[in-house]
Amino acid sequence: MDAAVAGLVAATVGVGGTLGSAWLTQRRGDASRREEWERLERTRRDEAAAQRAESGREARRAAYTEINAAARHYLATLNDHRHILRIGHDPQESLAAVEAARVEYRRRYAEAQMIVPDLVLTEVNRVDGDLNAVYGVLARLSRGTQREDDDIEAVRDAVKRGWQDLSRMRTTMRADLGVTGPSQGT
């Protein structure tokens, strides 16, 4: 009977071991698949976040390019109009060019307000203030409704400040995009 009990115990342990090893193998496979799925999910989330960041960077780059070009064109047009007034030519044609540049600039400025981060928006707003001040004086001078302190030479200084502020705005934009600094080849 000892041999029979020993045989029964050996058979039970053998069957239990076989079933236990199958169960353990299944659990380990499930855990491995779960870890792989979690790793793939993390990778997918990381790639989606990187893609969103790149998409945002591209949207900012496009907005920066557009507002920079529009502001530069508007300021150049204002400066041209200043020259027309200074030399005494009829300002109507020049004023029409200023108005067209102003409309385009205002559209780009409105777009930039929705896209650019606060640090860049501070510089964009500074340039906007410069442009509005120059436009206001030139518009009043063109229409003969100037104020006591409106002066064509003061506009020259304001235009000069405008170019400096445009340069500062561009530098801030480039820094935000990560393109400012020494080149990789040097």
Image (cartoon, rainbow, N blue to C red):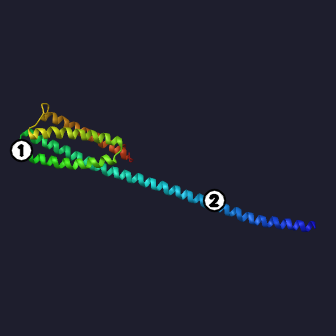
Q: Position of residue 143 (x, y in %)?
A: 9, 40
Mark 2 burial class by Cα count in 10 Å: few <14, some 14-19, many 20+: few
Query: At 93% across and 65% down in the image, what residue appears?
Result: 2
Circle on res. 180: none
Which kind of residue does numbered mark 2 sit on? Ala
Query: At 79% across and 67% down in the image, what residue appears?
Result: 15
Name the image quarter holding residue 160: top left
Mark 1 burial class by Cα count in 10 Å: few <14, some 14-19, many 20+: few
Circle on res. 31: 2
Residue placed under numbered mark 1 in the picture: 90
Q: Is residue 109 left or right of residue 36?
A: left
Which kind of residue does numbered mark 1 sit on? Asp
Under circle 2, the secondary element is: helix
Name the image quarter holding residue 28: bottom right
Q: Position of residue 168 (x, y in %)?
A: 29, 39
Query: At 16% across and 47% down in the image, what residue appears?
Result: 99
Residues under numbered marks 2 and 1 in contact, where contact means CB atoms less than 8 Å apart: no
Name the image quarter holding residue 186: top left
Q: Along the polypeptide, which appears first: circle 2 or circle 1?
A: 2
How far apart marks 2 and 1 lie (CA) works out to 82 Å
Under circle 1, the secondary element is: loop
Q: How many marks?
A: 2
Q: Position of residue 12 (x, y in %)?
A: 82, 66
Locate the N terminus and report the quarter of the image it occupies. bottom right
Q: Is residue 121 left or right of residue 9?
A: left
Q: Is residue 47 left or right of residue 82?
A: right
Along the line of sight, the residue nearer the viewer: 180 or 151: 151
Query: At 11% across and 46% down in the image, what residue appears?
Result: 94
Question: Does residue 137 show up?
Answer: yes
